[in-house]
Image (cartoon, rainbow, N blue to C red):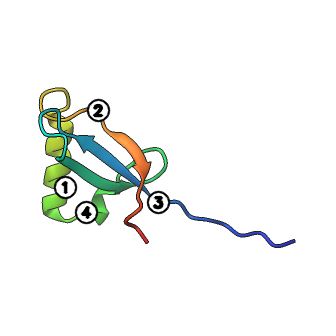
Amino acid sequence: MDISVTHQRYALRFQSLFNQGRAMVFPCDERGQVDLDALSERARENYFYARAVIGFEYTEPAVTPDYSAG
């Protein structure tokens, strides 16, 4: 029997409440867990900022397929 496993990558997306074209996106697992140790310092700062301003500047984050993760 041939079994092929597809590894789906995901992204956690914080959509701007005021600018539809603006969002902060971070790699995550299927549950939306972000590996903070894998992020750069700037990305970690952006992640914590986006979480802090949910409902004020960004929406609740959504887990989406990460199509850029070739």
Residue appearing at x 19%, y 55% in the figure: 44
Q: Secondary structure at mark 2?
A: loop
Q: Amino acid at mark 3?
A: Arg
First of labels 4, 2 by sequence position:
4
| In the displayed structure image, the side of residue 13 where residue 3 appears, left or right | right
Give the CA distance from mark 2 to mark 1. 17 Å
Residue appearing at x 15%, y 62% in the figure: 41
- For disc 3, the marked residue is 9
Give the CA distance from mark 2 to mark 3. 20 Å
Give the CA distance from mark 4 to mark 1. 6 Å
- Badge 3: few (under 14), some or many (20 or more) residues near its Cα, within 10 Å? some
Q: Position of residue 15 (x, y in %)?
A: 23, 40
Q: Amino acid at mark 1?
A: Arg
Give the CA distance from mark 4 to mark 3. 16 Å
Q: Nearer the viewer, mark 4 or mark 3?
A: 3
- For disc 1, the marked residue is 44
Q: Secondary structure at mark 1?
A: helix
- Nearest the eye: 11 or 44: 11
Residue appearing at x 87%, y 71% in the figure: 1
Q: Secondary structure at mark 3?
A: loop
Up the image or down, 19 lies above or below 64; here it is: above
Q: Based on the displayed image, in which of its 4 quarters is residue 50 positioned? A: top left
- For disc 4, the marked residue is 39
First of labels 2, 3 by sequence position:
3
Instruction: Mark 4 and mark 3 in contact? Answer it, CB < 8 Å.
Output: no
